Image: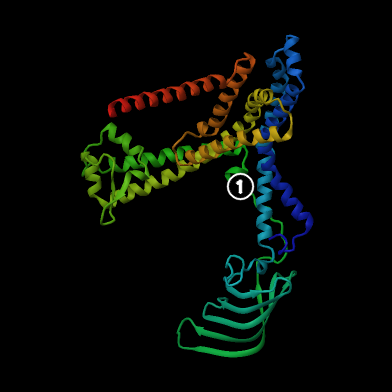
């Protein structure tokens, strides 16, 4: 896209630079893990760990400066995620949008009509596009510029030129036909042929205009902005949920009395609590044997209103969870810089190898596990199956617990996994199975005799 739109090299480099921000945010925790694995692996391979122990210097003491440094890195990562990353995300998205709107004709795909968002009142289709020149072939154009006349142009080929000073596409059509019909009366239909015809089309932009739109998504806001949005949406969720209960209370003249249990149930209604019968009529499927719910289900109009209220409240709740996930993520990912120290030190000592292959390989494995839990938790939180704070901190809890377990075993110089014990257990199991088979064979032989 960047090449076909003839974007200048500095702009391409700027787009790449802006997109590096989110990569840096994720790379810092992994960099800490790689560095820790390689450092302590090299120390172990050079017997420096053994020398330290002989001098009465424990591994936990060697970890202390690394932990202190990881705290500073985590704080720097947190500030980066909260201050720099949102701004870079905004600028990267806006630059990408600006590039998308530059030279819209080069966004055409062969055999597909153009997007009306870029070229107003016109739909253009080209059967073949010569990317090396300004020629297109098999041209079909629907012209809606005049609301009273629908015009269709068909041409064998055409040239496309841009007038950057006036934001226009100039097309020279060759060997074609023009069809026009009056949309009001539908009585006049005009057709004429031409060997060459010029068409001017106004477009949004044929040059790269740098806009300054300040609309931000949830990943383009800092913690203060996110908390401000949370403060706005929380009372809105409560209001919409309470509205569901109030709708029933306002109908007490024709509905059964609402109990505190039913009030709580209606307040916490979810879209999944509604189903459709064979006549495509909605009803509340939970507590369907309750007298109040039975009366509500008999009133289809009321059920439809309640379902609409529940869907809107659920939509706001999902957005609330997304905001809370982004807030917690800004804390949890930097905290991984500290957590990975507890993984890197014991594994580095155990592997006794400081090479990049070992360090990088083990780091990728643990980081993939960490990232899988992070993504999974985010999806579970969006579906309201897990609290946002737990979804974002669960990877740190799991990986951190494993790291502390490995570190304690290393400090105590006890094997984290006693492979000898498992080997002896496996041998005992195989011997027992062999003895059992021999006994069965002897018994079957005696029976045959």
In the figure, residue 268 lies in which quadrant?
A: top left
In the figure, residue 246 lies in which quadrant?
A: top left
Q: Residue 103, how many percent across, how many down?
A: 69, 66
| Quarter placement of the C terminus | top left
Count of numbered marks: 1
Q: Give the answer, above or below, for where 157 lies relative to 13.
A: below
Q: Residue at x 28, y 31 (%)?
A: 260
Residue at the outermost top position: 56
Please state which of residues 183 and 153 is positioned toward the viewer in this rendering.
153
In the figure, residue 278 lies in which quadrant?
A: bottom left
Q: Secondary structure at mark 1?
A: loop
Residue 195 seen in this snapshot? yes
* Colour treatment of the image: rainbow
Q: Residue at x 60, y 43 (%)?
A: 219
Q: Give the answer, above or below, for where 19 lies relative to 33.
A: below
Please state which of residues 137 and 185 is positioned toward the viewer in this rendering.
137
Q: Residue 232, how many percent across, how many down?
A: 51, 39
Q: Residue at x 75, y 19 (%)?
A: 47
| Left or right placement of residue 226 versus residue 313 in this view | right
| Left or right placement of residue 250 versus residue 369 in this view | left
Q: Residue 304, how many percent across, how many down?
A: 32, 51
Please state which of residues 416 and 65 is positioned toward the viewer in this rendering.
416
Report crowding for label 1: few under 14, some 14 to 19, many 20 or more residues within 10 A (C-alpha): some
Q: Give the answer, above or below, for where 184 lies relative to 217.
A: below
Badge 1 is on which residue?
A: 216
Q: Residue 122, how many percent across, how many down?
A: 58, 73
Please state which of residues 345 and 103 is positioned toward the viewer in this rendering.
345
């Amino acid at each position: 896209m960047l090449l076909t739109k003839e974007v200048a090299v500095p702009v391409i480099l700027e787009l790449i630079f802006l997109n590096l921000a989110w990569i840096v945010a994720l790379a810092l925790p992994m960099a800490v893990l790689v560095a820790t694995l390689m450092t302590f692996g090299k120390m172990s391979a050079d017997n420096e760990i053994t020398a330290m122990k002989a001098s009465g210097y424990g591994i936990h003491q060697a970890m202390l400066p690394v932990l202190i440094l990881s705290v500073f890195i985590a704080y720097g990562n947190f500030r980066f995620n909260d201050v720099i990353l949102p701004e870079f995300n905004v600028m990267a998205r806006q630059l990408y949008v600006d590039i998308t709107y530059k030279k819209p004709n080069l966004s055409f795909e062969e055999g597909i009509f153009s997007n009306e968002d870029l070229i107003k009142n016109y739909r253009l289709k080209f059967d073949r596009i010569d990317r090396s020149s300004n020629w297109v072939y098999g041209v079909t154009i629907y012209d809606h510029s005049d609301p009273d006349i629908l015009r269709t142009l068909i041409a064998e080929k055409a040239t496309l030129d841009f007038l950057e000073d006036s934001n226009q596409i100039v097309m020279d059509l060759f060997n074609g036909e023009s069809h026009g019909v009056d949309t009001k009366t539908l009585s006049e239909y005009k057709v004429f042929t031409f060997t060459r015809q010029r068409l001017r089309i106004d477009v949004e932009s044929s040059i790269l205009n740098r806009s300054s739109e300040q609309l931000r998504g949830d990943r383009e806001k800092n913690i203060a902005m996110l908390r401000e949005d949370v403060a706005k949406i929380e009372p809105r969720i409560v209001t919409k949920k309470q509205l569901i209960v109030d709708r029933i209370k306002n109908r007490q003249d024709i509905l059964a009395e609402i109990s505190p249990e039913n009030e709580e149930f209606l307040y916490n209604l979810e879209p999944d609590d509604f189903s459709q019968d064979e006549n495509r009529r909605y009803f509340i499927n939970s507590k369907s044997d309750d007298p109040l719910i039975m009366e509500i289900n008999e009133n289809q109009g009321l059920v439809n209103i309640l379902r609409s209220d529940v869907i809107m409240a659920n939509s706001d709740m999902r957005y609330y969870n997304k905001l809370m996930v982004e807030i917690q993520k800004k804390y949890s990912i930097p905290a991984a810089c500290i957590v990975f120290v507890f993984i890197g030190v014991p594994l580095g000592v155990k592997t006794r190898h400081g090479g990049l292959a070992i360090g990088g390989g083990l780091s990728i494995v643990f980081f993939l596990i960490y990232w899988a839990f992070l993504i999974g938790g985010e999806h579970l939180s969006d579906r309201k199956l897990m609290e946002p704070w737990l979804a974002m901190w669960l990877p740190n809890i799991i990986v951190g617990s494993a790291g502390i377990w490995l570190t304690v075993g290393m400090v105590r110089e006890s094997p984290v996994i006693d492979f000898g014990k498992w080997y002896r257990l496996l041998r005992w199991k195989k011997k027992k199975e062999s003895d059992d088979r021999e006994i069965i064979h002897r018994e079957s032989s005696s029976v045959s005799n």
